[in-house]
């Protein structure tokens, strides 16, 4: 059916959208997800018992809208170049239902918020301590090398001979390996410590990023902050806001505004060591950045090739690998 639809002319598709939108058929879900540009966020951050400073510019977090595509959105994506369609299996891992995926996304956001605050405060000279009970398996990707080795509720406590206390800690250590490497995973099941060897595979979303093949959360994760920092994340989910949350917290607490009145936007996950990781929906995020007039856009290095096609005289796009590098790039850009 999709091949037939792809051969339809633009006028025919417009007519179909009109007819489908006016009928109950338009609400029927397809086997696809759609991804479109989301609203850029300037985070609302509250800090307790600490002097903060206003910014003359903006540090936008770029987002996407991602949802199951009914037939209306399916046909609409055929006309709107800013909207992409993904087969259901590309977004929703087998064995994970949409509600579980949404809960995982919310957990990722909560973790990302705490990690971002910790990275910003560490950069300001604070020594933030964190603790957690390990990496809890909450879902397993069907067909992955660990599908027959791990179970939900297994608690991963080591990779090779290094202890892991949180998802962020685990991801940071995982990035020291390459796709195809064999690593030893130690985990606790029913109170017993067990281990196995597994081959790292390429991430299902991020090219060049190694992964084991499961979904995870951190039980009893605690961050010891010297004062309260609360980021109103609203309905935004997932980990890709980490970099820009960290930059916003940092800018709020330093006397010299790092934006110097510029409109800056960006995206990227962040780990406790300050490293910045890849994200999905880069095309949609860059389109959203251009719509709000962003002069500088920061993207993870592994996403730069996709983002670079949108560089023009009004939008500079720069790849970064870490929080420290992001600060350096912003300083160099705003000092011109």
Image (tube, helix red, strand yellow):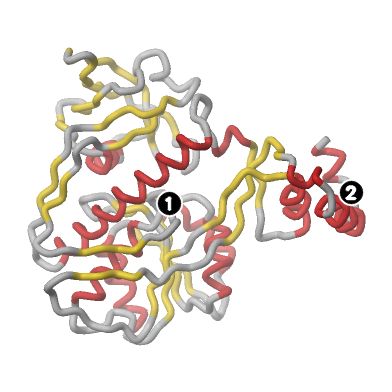
Tag 1's secondary structure? loop
| Mark 1 crowd level (few <14, some 14–19, many ≥20, 10 Å Cα) | some
- Residue at image location 38% in from the left, 19% down from the top: 146
**Residue 274 vs residue 140: left or right?**
left
Which is nearer the eye, 252 or 269?
A: 252
Residue topped by disc 2: 8
- Residue at image location 53% in from the left, 26% down from the top: 94
> On residue 237, which mark appears?
1
**Residue 217 vs residue 162: left or right?**
right
Q: Quadrant of residue 184?
A: top left
Q: Disc 2 and disc 1: Cα gap in Å?
A: 36 Å
**Residue 119 vs residue 93: left or right?**
left
Which is nearer the eye, 311 or 89?
A: 89
Q: Quadrant of residue 254?
A: bottom left
Query: In the rendered structure, which disc, 2 or 1, sits on the residue that comes first in sequence?
Result: 2
- Residue at image location 21% in from the left, 64% down from the top: 229
**Residue 312 vs residue 136: left or right?**
right
């Amino acid at each position: 059916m999709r091949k037939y639809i792809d051969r339809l002319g633009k006028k025919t598709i417009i007519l179909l959208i009109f007819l489908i939108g006016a009928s109950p058929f338009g609400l029927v879900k397809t086997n696809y997800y759609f991804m479109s540009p989301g609203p850029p966020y300037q985070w609302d951050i509250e800090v307790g018992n600490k002097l903060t400073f206003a910014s003359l510019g903006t540090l936008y977090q770029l987002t996407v809208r991602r949802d199951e595509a009914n037939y209306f959105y399916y046909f609409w994506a055929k006309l709107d170049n800013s909207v992409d369609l993904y087969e259901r299996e590309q977004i929703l891992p087998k064995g994970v239902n949409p509600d579980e995926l949404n809960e995982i996304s919310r957990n990722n956001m909560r973790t990302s918020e705490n990690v971002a605050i910790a990275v910003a405060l560490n950069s300001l000279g604070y020594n933030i301590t964190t603790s957690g009970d390990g990496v809890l398996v909450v879902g397993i990707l069907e067909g992955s090398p660990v599908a027959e080795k791990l179970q939900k509720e297994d608690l991963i406590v080591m990779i090779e001979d290094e202890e892991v206390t949180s998802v962020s800690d685990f991801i940071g250590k995982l990035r020291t390996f390459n796709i195809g490497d064999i690593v030893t995973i130690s985990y606790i099941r029913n109170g017993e410590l067990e281990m196995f060897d597994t081959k790292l595979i390429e991430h299902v979303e991020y090219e060049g990023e190694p992964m084991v093949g499961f979904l995870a959360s951190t039980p009893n994760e605690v961050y010891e902050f010297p004062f309260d920092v609360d980021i109103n994340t609203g309905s935004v989910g997932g980990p890709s806001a980490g970099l820009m949350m960290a930059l916003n917290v940092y800018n709020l607490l330093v006397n010299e505004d790092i934006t110097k009145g510029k409109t800056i936007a960006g995206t990227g996950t962040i780990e406790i060591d300050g490293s910045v990781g890849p994200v999905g929906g880069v095309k949609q995020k860059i389109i959203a950045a251009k719509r709000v007039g962003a002069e500088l856009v920061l993207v993870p290095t592994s996403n730069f090739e996709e983002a670079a096609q949108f560089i023009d005289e009004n939008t500079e796009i720069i790849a970064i690998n870490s929080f420290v590098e992001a600060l350096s790039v912003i300083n160099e850009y705003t000092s011109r």
